[in-house]
Amino acid sequence: MKIAVLAGDGIGPEVTREAVRVLEALGLAGLELVEGDVGGMAYKKHGHPLPAATLDLARASDGILFGAVGDPDCDNLERHLRPEQAILGLRKELGLFANLRPARVFAGLEDFSALRPEVAGAIDLLIVRELNGDVYFGEKGIRTLPDGRRQGWDMMSYAEDEVRRIAHVAFRAAQGRNGKLCSVDKANVLETFQLWRDVVTEVAAEYPDVELSHMYVDNAAMQLVRNPGQFDVVVTGNMFGDILSDQASMCVGSIGLLASASLSEGKLGLYEPIHGSAPDIAGKGLANPMATVLSAAMLLRHSLGMEDQAARIEAAVARALADGVRGADLGGSHGTALIGDAIVERL
Ligand code: IPM
Ligand code: MG
């Protein structure tokens, strides 16, 4: 079993190091970890944020553990050379179309939420975000109109098969949870999302055991802070999912705790914390590695079929939190390595 470790920029290497230590502490036989360059650091070394060697490594692996990309030094590069293109390229090239972003409040952390503790305590939801389509991957450009004004444009579209396959992932996820699926769209204004709604409704016929509802994205943003406990699984497009998942992270309390999986039709998946490269605290040993550690657990579960080992890691993280282990993101004084130690001890 080969895991590609793409640590990337900013705090990526620090948090990934702790996740690798946790994986190694499991003592699994036949697990090979191979490092690759990605993001701004790869641009500086090789002239491209997603070098061919990294893409080959990712393709040849069973799972990808990803840190973060983003580097202020690269802000003025042409768009196709920016660090963010590495993660977008991996998602597209590897067909990682289904992004799972679970959000729930760990017991005892209700007070860290931006919401009232009793509202926050009810959060246990899964955002299923489509990752390969939408306005992210449409044709785009900045052009000059005949009258001389510049115009930026980005084409939004979804083909029905793209909607259908993410809908199936979401319905199956709901079957494995509380049987409720809310599809978030903007069908009242956008044709793209009228088709989205029609296709999700068609797919629902195959899942009579799942209760499907539809919600406009603006209302969903409001409901997510008003009464997040109403959601079980939420399925939505690439752009709305990007926004709603950041919002959900603050409802939970810290973005330093949220893991994610990006899955393909097969076993290959990419696993990364939801947070970014946080250049302001990079290299200081302050970042909370828990989100990356929990992403490694998702890797074991979804790509390697090791549910027991995944649950062991999740239990160790929950235990560390229950014992008062707190990173700076949670008002505590535990640094990156100390949090890694605390998790490894509890394993
Ligand atoms: C995310 C990030 C990315 C996205 C960026 C870094 C391209 O915000 O994974 O949510 O917009 O998808
Ligand atoms: Mg985002």
Image (cartoon, rainbow, N blue to C red):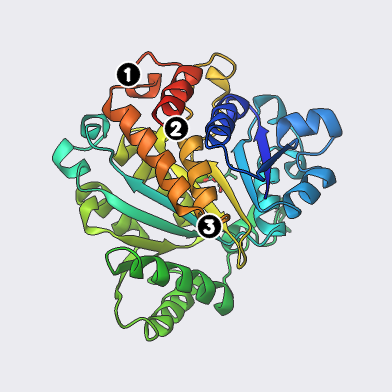
**Hey, which quadrant is residue 79 in on the image?**
top right
- Is the Cβ of the residue at disc 1 closer than 8 Å to that at disc 3? no
Gap between marks 1 and 3 measured at Cα: 35 Å
Mark 1 or mark 2: name the one nearer the start of the chain: 2
10 Å crowding of disc 2: few (<14), some (14-19), many (20+):
many
- Is the Cβ of the residue at disc 2 closer than 8 Å to that at disc 3? no
Name the residue tied to disc 2.
290
Kind of residue at badge 2: Met
Give the image quadrant in which the ligand numbered 1 is located.
top right
Q: Which residue corresponds to the image point at 49% horizontal and 62% vertical from the top-left?
A: 237
Name the residue tied to disc 3.
305
Along the viewing direction, whichever of 318 and 251 lies nearer the viewer: 318
Relative image position of residue 9 (x, y in whole percent): 65, 29
Count of picture labels: 3
Name the residue tied to disc 1.
331
Relative image position of residue 278 (x, y in whole percent): 54, 26
